[in-house]
Image (cartoon, helix red, strand yellow):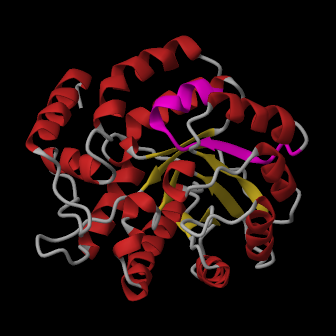
Amino acid sequence: MIKFRGAFTALITPMTPDGSVDYEGVRRLVRFQLENGINGLVPLGTSGETPTLDENEEAEIIAAIMPVVRDWEKEHNVKIPVILGAGSNNTRDAVRYVRRAKDAGADAALVVTPYYNKPSDEGIFRHFEAVSKVGFPVIVYNIQGRTGRNIETAVLDRIAGLPNIAGVKEASGNINQMMDVISRIKSRHPDFAVLSGDDSLTLPLVAMGGDGIVSVVSNLAPGIVTEMVQTALAGDFAAARKIHYRLLPFFKAAFCDGNPTSIKYAMRCKGLPSGAVRLPLVEVRPEAKKIIEAALEECGL
């Protein structure tokens, strides 16, 4: 199983002014990421607006991304892991999406805690047990703020013992929980990746023994985010801290009026493929635009 370590971009889905998917924009964004040294890509996650994409659009996005990445790998003799979003609050659909990721030639599937129906701890475990049986690497995505359920460390410990569970995207925002995951789970499963789901907590997590970030900010600044992560992983925390504090104003601004609305506006300011968002998401407020613009200037982005 691949070791998932470094900076991974939670890719937005570029759209045209009429709200249709901009597939050429998808390819341009992927090339931009690769040219700037990103370690891996995570399409079809929350930042990719999957709640408003239909399955045909998702299939076209996968078809746009995979050849660009694989051609780049061959040309540059590198490995760029692609972790495809495969979450659902219907376990049967989640299993199907994990199979889709496997069939597409991705490297792993990102599976979020079942949302809205708020299953018990046993239900959460059985959900991940079902997707693990596909026979494909799975990254668990823990984000209580969007799902209504936190995966407690004791439950994640059970899940980590299943075959094909490759790691966790930890977006609980709880540093104490992250430390528990590292000390209790990673200590016994060294290849179990612990990735931050919050840009601003990347450096603290790596300093505690984590493996990197699934980043929203790297949609706009892949090179700088990757440099921060790789510098921290190498143990040069003074240099990594300098980058962290340079980016801190944008870490905050990139979520000031929701995600991916805020990062899409920032990318539009810099001429990167982004475009509109689909309802129920709406354009960022005028006051948020000022915050984002000021942060971009302050950070030198």
Over which residues does the magenta segment extend?
Answer: 189-206
Residue at 65%, 23% in the rendered image: 207
Residue at 87%, 45% in the rendered image: 189
Query: In the image as oriented, which residue stretches furthest toward the top?
Result: 238
Q: Quadrant of residue 253?
A: top left
Q: Nearer the viewer, residue 67 or 46?
A: 46
Residue at 81%, 64% in the rendered image: 122
In the rendered view, would you say 58 is above or below 129? Answer: below
Q: Nearer the viewer, residue 89 or 104?
A: 89
The x, y position of residue 61, in whole percent, is: 39, 76
The x, y position of residue 193, in whole percent, is: 71, 46
Image quadrant for the N terminus?
A: bottom right
In the rendered view, would you say 17 is above or below 248? Answer: below
Total numbered labels:
0
Residue at 34%, 74% in the rendered image: 52
Q: Nearer the viewer, residue 111 or 73?
A: 111
The x, y position of residue 187, in whole percent, is: 87, 36
The x, y position of residue 260, in whole percent, is: 32, 54
* In this rendering, position of residue 172 left or right of residue 186: left
* In this rendering, position of residue 282 left or right of residue 17: right
Q: Quadrant of residue 274?
A: bottom left
In the rendered view, would you say 45 is above or below 170? Answer: below
Image quadrant for the C terminus?
A: top left
Q: Is residue 29 visible?
A: yes
* In this rendering, position of residue 236 left or right of residue 268: right
* In this rendering, position of residue 137 left or right of residue 37: right
Query: In the image as oriented, which residue stretches furthest toward the bottom?
Result: 56
Q: Nearer the viewer, residue 134 or 107?
A: 134
Asked whether residue 118 is drawn in magenta, I would say no
